[in-house]
């Protein structure tokens, strides 16, 4: 059972199917007995289109003070070109990741029945505040035939080390402790060398963890051909972004993939969100798959220290055996509630 605490959760349903899958996740969490006090924030594409608002400093500061943030999905419908690329990504999602120092993006995967990676369990620990996402670079002579665009990758000793240490801690707690660094050390020699040295150094503190290294292109093959080789994959922001979509695809689809944007130092609220997008085409059909949102909420429970509730929700998702398209959002949620 949960303790007596009430957790203050900021709910950012967002756009498309975001609000409905988030409500399903909240229903499942509440059914565990964990008590949540929710505060709703309207942020995302719809809010931006309505009044030009993305996220301001005051809202960001207020988010910082919550015990957790639960996010559904953010973004316009495919083909809706009214919002320039980057406005929501940089202005909302990355602003929260950077502003709240959510330096880990933890993405666990479990191959569902019938998937390429059926039965495999592994997780990606993605550095979440640096790399090419840091926004270093710029444009010169825009729009001319001499245009120059540079986009740097920022890798700090501090940022890499805290990410690698978190990944080792995760790896150490696995039944078979294994950590694989994924990078491109043969070409990105400066950043790659830093990552490789840090893994070597931090690895000395974790003698029980087997350490491996894959180039990112090879990891794309291995994720498809031998995903059972992985325990924890630790990698930089951009490689982690790309690999987690591939990992989602081989483990049953992005509809199952959960993520935790974590500030393990707890200097700001951590944020939990499914990896999938807003899927506007599913709005109103009742067919949105809530499993990734529910699994993300389980990661939230884990972060809040509600380990038993987290385990119950995770197992309910694991035991789910219906067809999402037949059961629909409500049917899936009902089955999860029965299995808690
Ligand atoms: C993700 C998404 C984001 C990212 C986008 C929407 C900014 O693809 O969470 O994986 O690139 O990190
Ligand atoms: Mn992505």
Image (cartoon, helix red, strand yellow):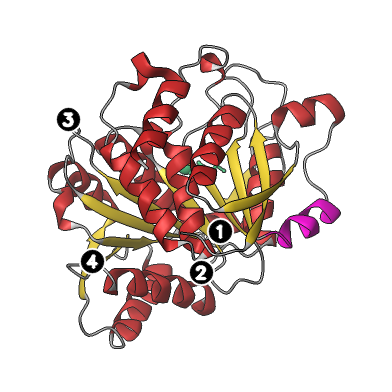
Point 53% across, 79% down: residue:
158
Based on the picture, tell me whether residue 228 belongs to the magenta stretch. Answer: no
Residue 262 lies, in percent from the top left, at: 53, 61
The label nearer to you, 3 versus 1, is 3
Mark sitting on residue 144: none
Magenta region, residue range? 57-66
The label nearer to you, 4 versus 3, is 3
The residue carrying pointer 3 sits among few (fewer than 14), some (14 to 19) or many (20 or more) residues within 10 Å by Cα, namely few
The residue carrying pointer 2 sits among few (fewer than 14), some (14 to 19) or many (20 or more) residues within 10 Å by Cα, namely many
Q: Which residue is mark 4?
A: 213
Of callouts 2 and 3, the N-terminal one? 3
Q: Which residue is mark 2?
A: 155
Q: For this view, does 211 lie left or right of residue 297?
A: left
Give the quadrant of residue 126. Answer: bottom left
Q: CA distance from mark 4 to mark 3?
A: 28 Å
The residue carrying pointer 4 sits among few (fewer than 14), some (14 to 19) or many (20 or more) residues within 10 Å by Cα, namely some
Give the quadrant of residue 96. Answer: bottom right
Q: Confirm or deny contact between disc 2 and disc 4 (CB under 8 A).
A: no
| Circle 4: element type | strand
Based on the picture, tell me whether residue 58 belongs to the magenta stretch. Answer: yes
The label nearer to you, 4 versus 1, is 4
Q: Does the closest atom of ligand 2 sit within 8 Å of the Cβ of label 3?
A: no
Q: For this view, does 131 lie left or right of residue 213?
A: right
Q: Main secondary structure of the magenta part?
A: helix
Point 40% across, 26% down: residue:
332
Point 28% across, 42% down: residue:
318
Give the quadrant of residue 202. Answer: bottom left
Q: Which residue is mark 3?
A: 114
The label nearer to you, 2 versus 1, is 2
Q: Which residue is mark 1?
A: 152
């Amino acid at each position: 059972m949960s303790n007596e605490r009430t957790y203050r959760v900021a709910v950012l349903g967002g756009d498309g199917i975001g609000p409905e899958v988030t409500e399903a996740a909240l229903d499942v969490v509440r059914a565990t007995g964990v008590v949540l006090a929710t505060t709703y924030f309207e942020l995302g594409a719809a809010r931006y289109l309505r009044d030009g608002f993305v996220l301001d400093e005051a809202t960001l500061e207020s988010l910082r003070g919550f015990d957790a943030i639960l996010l559904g999905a953010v973004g316009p419908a495919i083909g809706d070109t009214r919002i320039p690329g980057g406005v929501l990504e940089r202005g909302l999602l990355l602003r929260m990741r950077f502003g709240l120092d959510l330096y880990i993006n933890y993405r666990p995967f479990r191959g569902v029945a019938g998937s390429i990676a059926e039965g495999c369990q592994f997780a990606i620990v993605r550095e979440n505040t640096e790399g090419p996402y840091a926004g270093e670079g710029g444009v010169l002579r825009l729009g001319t035939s001499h245009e120059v665009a540079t986009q740097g990758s920022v890798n700090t000793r501090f940022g890499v080390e805290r990410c690698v240490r978190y990944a080792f801690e995760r790896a150490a707690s696995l039944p078979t402790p294994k950590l694989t660094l994924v990078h491109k050390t043969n070409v990105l020699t400066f950043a790659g060398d830093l990552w490789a040295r840090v893994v070597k150094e931090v690895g000395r503190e974790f003698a029980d963890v087997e350490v491996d290294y894959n180039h990112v292109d090879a990891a794309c093959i291995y994720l498809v051909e031998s995903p059972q080789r992985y325990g924890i994959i630790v990698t930089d922001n951009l490689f982690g972004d790309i690999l987690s979509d591939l990992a989602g695809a081989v483990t049953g689809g992005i509809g199952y993939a959960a993520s935790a944007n974590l500030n393990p130092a707890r200097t700001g609220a951590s944020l939990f969100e499914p990896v999938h997008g807003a899927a506007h085409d599913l709005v109103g059909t009742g067919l949105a798959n809530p499993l990734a949102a529910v699994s993300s909420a389980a990661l939230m429970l884990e972060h809040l220290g509600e380990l038993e509730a987290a385990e119950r929700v995770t197992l309910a998702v694991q035991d789910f055996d219906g067809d999402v398209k037949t059961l629909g959002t409500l049917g899936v949620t009902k089955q999860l509630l029965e299995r808690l």
